[in-house]
Amino acid sequence: MNDMTPEKSGKKERSKLAKWSRRGFIGAGVLAGGGLLIGIGVRPGNPIDKLAPKVAAGEGEQLVNSWVKIDADNVVTAIVPHCEMGQGAHSVLAQMLADELDADWDLVKVMQAPTDGSYIVSDTARMFAAPFTLNAANWIEPTWDGLFTQLGRSMDLMITGGSSSIRSTGQYSMRIAGAAARKMLVGAAADAWGVPSSEIVTRDSMLFHEASGKSATYAQFASAAAEQPMDATPVLKKAKQYRLMGKSKARTDIPAKVDGTAQFGIDAVPEGLDLSYAAVVRPPVPGTEVVRMDVGTAKQMPGVLQILNMGDHVAVVAESYWHAQQAANAISIEWSKPASPIRTMDDQYQVFAKALDEAGETGGEEAAARGDAQAALGNAATRIDAEYRVPYLAHAPMEPMNCTAHVEGGKCDIWTSTQVPLAARSEVAKALGMGADDITIHHPYLGGAFGRRLGAEYVAMAARVAKATGYPVKMIWSREEDTQKALYRDADTCRMRAGIDDGGRLVAFDSLFTQRHDPPEACVPAMYDIPNTSIRVAEAELHLPFQAWRSVDHSKQGFFIESFIDEAAHAAGADPLDFRLALLSEAPRHKAVLEKLAEISDWRGTRTEGTAKGVAIVESFGTIVGEVVEVDMSSGKPELVNVWAVCDAGYVMSPDGFRNQIEGGIVFGLTAALYGELDLEDGAIVQSNFHDYRMLRMDEMPEIEVAIINSGDVPIGGAGEPGLPPVAPALANAIFAATGDRKRTLPLAKQFT
Amino acid sequence: MASFILNGEPVSIDADPAMPILWVVREKAGLAGTKFGCGIAQCGACTVHLDGQPVRSCSTPVSMAEGREVTTIEGIAGPNDELTAVQEAWISEQVPQCGYCQSGQIMSATALLRDNPDPSDDDIDAAMSGNICRCGTYKRIRQAIKVAAGSAQPRNEEA
């Protein structure tokens, strides 16, 4: 990973793109049939010639790097390095590339880049490996806990996460690839026509020279363009020159998602393979293993082929998934004694409490500090203290974990929904004792992920089962396995203290909690001008295995911080929105978001009897989102009426897609705020399926209005996650406004029965 | 042997009579548009029509389909694969995100509009609350149903 070594250069005069391109590699090659292929990679050496056959082989192939392909029929193909899990990135990335290329949008196709070790999501890798080469500290996103580990271990950075597709891949690869390709096409035409490049105009995948009346399609100059010098720092368009960026183009993946033809991981039926199906039983308590297995009648059940004790799980292989699952349900398994003493959530919260008690008022690891919080708390005219709690949560994507694996002749093929195809490949290689080059990962659309599919343990499991049986096997987890034996959003307890002076100003803020994953700055209310701040972490053991969950630490810290700021506002006798505005003197974008939010939510208008509004604002993944939730408490239970969101992501590339993501983040956050909770009994998760792990449904939906502010001239922010963090605190704050009852523990619904 | 009409075609499939329709259509008939979500009729991802009525195919044994008509997402388009008004509305409103639940959503919505061409919000709530969308596209699903019903205008592209 030498080429990714962070470089602390003081050359601030260089543009960000120049820095990036200098470190990166841009190259061109010729495709069979005379097409042009352009790519950007971070590895030394030009990988294009090696890769050309892979991306040119057809639509069926998969995965990674940033490429554009121009075929002989003048079709431009954007080869996108990210998976499509519902975020709409495929289309938007193509829009960004096509805009810089001046391509005809009707002649643009999207293709997922092939899984190949030569490729990594270079720009994402760069954000992780060398974030400080970017000069905008507040939007850097060293997210996804697991990735840091993977980065150090193997650089397996083919990831889709961290709300990063558009703001990193789009901004730093797709646009450059498009602009560079355009420049090479212009250069080739200029040479052929004997005219200066500056006189050539490009439009709708055509080249024009007005003075001579010459014109040509891009395809006509595609192979000549490959001989042109590459410009690693092409001039990119300014916002006023955008033709496709900033427009809501219809998503290219949607038609297949309405006629049933979209292929998800679970739909894989590899040609020529006679699939068997596996159901699995995994340990109810994490880390335990099979001690004894009584297969009982399972072996004689119809369709059952094999029952395998895999040590860390039992696999039943059968002619159909349904038969496999029926047999799996009939097996009784004795599991080893768990090492963790945590048996219930009370135990887990006691573990947190002990760590917090030990850290006390000044201990723990300091995450951020400003002024002298302890002294300011002591001198404050008004002091408030509160303790907040959030539970463990499952990701519960609609497509349960599954993987199809075929091991034969020293090779392994994998079909699965994953956010991390290269990391999955490494895990399979390790599990099978094979070289990574012998493993091919095919990954179609993901039926949701939300961070869950950043973990790839299920992929390695399926590979092991396929190897053990000798058959090609499709392993599917039941919803119960998926809910109870997966990877989880962490639970935590947060203790907060605040001091308010005589003038009603928040002068001291202290928080102490036990779990800090990513992004590390999520726990810091940096936008607020609070003169004395202390943010501390007292690490404590988690019973359940962690995995990043949509917005990661912001999903907890948003609730802690924005609920407590609300408490401070009420303690100061101030309107919660005005109280925040007063603290945002140094944050004009945040202030503008709140002002717009006050306007669209009619914050200062008259209140309907029984209803009340709550506000919260969180900046995450480079996007500032303020939300107001209106709740109706007249029945004694929270009923959602309205959610207004105002978002400043700098510049939104596809407004409708952005709004869809924000709406989704709000619903995901409301589900967690109202219902999301996993209980433990004897160390095992109690909830098992959607009847007891409830999701928000159509009849509970509030009206949602999303407004966008393009403040411009700042690095652009993400869309997939930022809608989520403000909604839980805004709801709890609304409930307080309606009832005077401050809820400091999630979920909320069961507290109003 | 299970004999029924699948998307208009008579089929005879060698399947355990207790096997849910979901797995028969996915694994034996090769129609993967119908999705497995929960296995206990809680999420609606597996919704198909049995004699025109929406059922949760994960919890409906194929024996129940004997001699009857089963329609899946692959079977709702017109004779020349032209999309239905519901499918068109799903595109105009740009409803799907991950898309995994949408076959089931469309099957529920299709059945709703067949029985009730101009549904109210309450009607939509009643017909659609058995279908979970984890991506949270409910707002757009509601709008798309209204567009398909003709009671709302399609989204203006690029807005």
Image: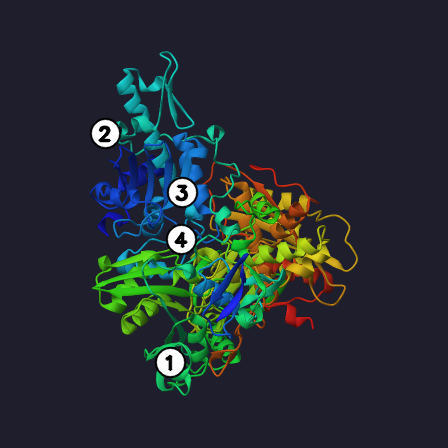
- Are the residues under badges 1 and 2 in a single subunit? yes
Q: Tell me the residue at 66%/41% (across/down).
A: B153
Q: Callout 1, which amino acid?
A: Thr
Choose the circle earlier in sequence order: 3 or 2.
3
Give SS at disc 2: loop
Q: Callout 4, which amino acid?
A: Thr
Foreground: disc 4 or disc 3: 3
Foreground: disc 3 or disc 2: 3
Observer-nearest of B113 and B37 = B113
- Are the residues under badges 4 and 2 in a single subunit? yes
Q: Callout 3, which amino acid?
A: Val
Give SS at disc 3: strand
Disc 1 residue crowd, few under 14, some 14–19, many 20+, Cα 10 Å: some
Give SS at disc 1: loop
Give the percent coordinates (x, y) of residue A259: 51, 51
Give the percent coordinates (x, y) of residue B78: 56, 47
Q: Which residue is mark 1?
A: A288
Q: Which mark is residue A110?
A: 3
Observer-nearest of B3 and A70 = B3
Give the percent coordinates (x, y) of residue B130: 62, 64
The C terminus of chain A - image quarter: bottom right
Q: Chain of mark 4?
A: A
Verify CB contact (< 8 Å) between mark 4 and mark 2. Answer: no
Q: Callout 2, which amino acid?
A: Glu
A114 to the left or right of A619? left
B142 to the left or right of A606? left
- Are the residues under badges 3 and 2 in a single subunit? yes
Choose the circle earlier in sequence order: 4 or 2.
4
Q: Chain of mark 2?
A: A
